[in-house]
Image (cartoon, grey):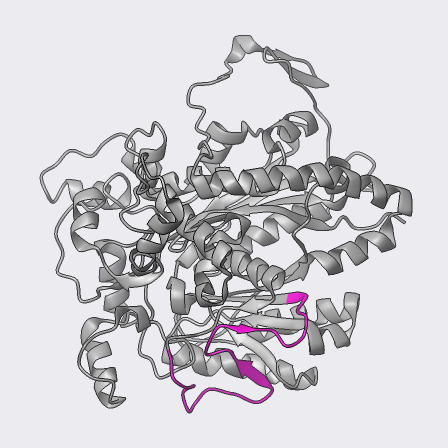
Amino acid sequence: MSKTPIPCLVGFGGITPAGRASHNLSYSRMIYGMENEQDQLDYLKSVMSLCDLVPEDTKDIKNFLKANEESVLDNTLMRKLDYDFFRETFWTYDYDFEVNACAQLPFQLDPVKSYPSRQHPKALGMSILGIADAMSDSGLDIRGIIDKYGRDKVGCFAGCAVMNMDRYSGDGLFASHPLGQRASSKQISFTLPEMPADFINAYVTGSLGITGHFIGACATSLYNLNAGVELIKNGKSELVIVGASEAILGPPAFIGFCAMGAMATDERMKNLQGLLSEGDELNYRKFCRPFGDNMGMVCGESSGFAILMSDRLAMEVGANIRASFLNVNINADGNKKSISGPGAGNYFSVGKTFKDIDAVFGSKVIKENSVFLAHGTGTPLNRITESHILSTFAKEYDINNLPVSSVKSKLGHTMGAAGMDQIWSGLGAMEKQKLTGICTIPKLADDVSKDNLDFYLEDREFSEKRDIVFMNSKGFGGNNATSAMISADLTKELLERRYGQKEMSSWKDKKENTSENRAKNKQMAIDNTIEPIYDFDKDVLDIADLDISKDSIKTSTGFDYKLESDLKGKDY
């Protein structure tokens, strides 16, 4: 009997409030105080280079970076909204904000200035930079592999949870008529939530394969991950790109979320600080307080893209397998009092994910070698419901102290990209064996379930090696998704069960070249010499360029694609 393909993560990248997600650069910011000097310097340079802040005549780069260390730290992660920059660059109209805390891209980074864009929304610019970052992280010639493997066999699932909503997309479209302005012909198409996948297919990979985007509110990233994982497991594709890009720091989103009462406004935070005797001065870095005394979420913007391969293809090309995903569990909440209220679905998705790991690796791995990245929005209802779910299953599996954290405390709620933030943070946690903590609260709220859980309220090194990162997403409307990311070491154990010594040795030999390329690519990421890929009007095909028969489609660019049915050989 043939074995089910293993979906392996061979590259990850993106543009986040911490900088580049590739090569654990963003994660270095999350645990900055625990990093060694070289990793700190690499991180500082990666941010300043990305934002074009390193003068060409800089002679002593180390002293320059050290002199600007505080500036980089102040201009990354969660902080006060840079109102003037956003108003001038991305917004259509002025708006009196009740909310001024957010997690925004480093400094005044405008990603669409990094390539020849044509009035592109910010989220699409983040997608173009992010997918190039992910390809860099892989150390492979991903586009060459796609061409060899077959552009018609590659999958891509990416998008946002809400919509693209700056002046070049939704915000500009909806505000144009009331403001007496003319809408552009691009705005409505750029508003569409699956546009990041469309951009990757059209201007980066030239993919002719399955494409789309699965929206599940704040669980969107894991919904797209599920689509990619299932495509590989059922054998329909061996290479899939999954991701998300969300840029919602603007009036439409803030107006809507404030109307819901979901946001951590300045006034509400001032009142909370008064109740907690924390003084009157607002600390915008500590507005998001998962599992602590809190009163609302904080918005962020981020993009992230994972390159998945089947174990067969990963072995063949010598991929650096950073992790793997065996399954994603998705469950709706069912009957509920209100569309925004909690339900039973997340108990199912979390419980089934624990079962998945137990079935493959046994309960010992869950008890001793796992960590949980919670959804952790920073709202009162989330802290009660999610902590109860985690505590319940920690007890059921006899886990004494399951490490728990939430990256939203530093990155804010990036909506559709929230699960991608969990992936790059989980990779960093496993590869560095250090977990970013919920550093915005002095203690847990009294109504948080604590039994059998170890909430990390500071950045800490693991006392025991962690090989499993559980990731949880709870989406508005009752969309729940949970998955477990398997470490490179445990994935290797799966491969050793499946392949012989000769095949494993061949893969390791090929991987040496990939590792050398990754090292070079990391330096390019640090120096910001990774060229964004935006092949506009290149190799465009029309009818005259296609030679079509019932068995194949050949193109003038040299590709010969077989027309085959997925139903061939099936018993109906």
Q: Residue at x 44, y 53 (%)?
A: 41
Say which of 455 and 522 sits in front. 522
Q: Residue 221: within the magenta?
A: no
User: On the picture, is 245 further left or further right than 176?
Assistant: right
Q: Provide residue 476's location: percent of width, then percent of height.
A: 42, 65
Q: Residue 456: within the magenta?
A: yes
> Dividing the picture into quarters, in which one does residue 81 lie?
bottom left
From the viewer's perspective, is residue 2 above or below residue 419? above
Q: Residue at x 61, y 79 (%)?
A: 402
Give the magenta part as a residue range. Answer: 441-468
> Dividing the picture into quarters, in which one does residue 269 lie?
bottom left
Q: Provide residue 266's location: percent of width, then percent of height.
A: 20, 72
Q: Residue at x 52, y 12 (%)?
A: 543
Mark yes or no: residue 383 visible.
yes
> Dividing the picture into quarters, in which one does residue 58 lie?
top left
From the viewer's perspective, is residue 149 above or below residue 378? above
Q: Provide residue 377's location: percent of width, then percent of height.
A: 41, 71
Mark yes or no: residue 160 visible.
no
Name the quarter where the C terminus is drawn.
Answer: top right
Say which of 465 and 200 sits in front. 465
Q: Provide residue 178's location: percent of width, then percent of height.
A: 12, 45
Say which of 196 and 454 sits in front. 454
User: On the picture, is 260 further left or further right than 350?
Assistant: left
User: On the picture, is 171 further left or further right than 156?
Assistant: left
User: On the picture, is 178 further left or further right than 339?
Assistant: left
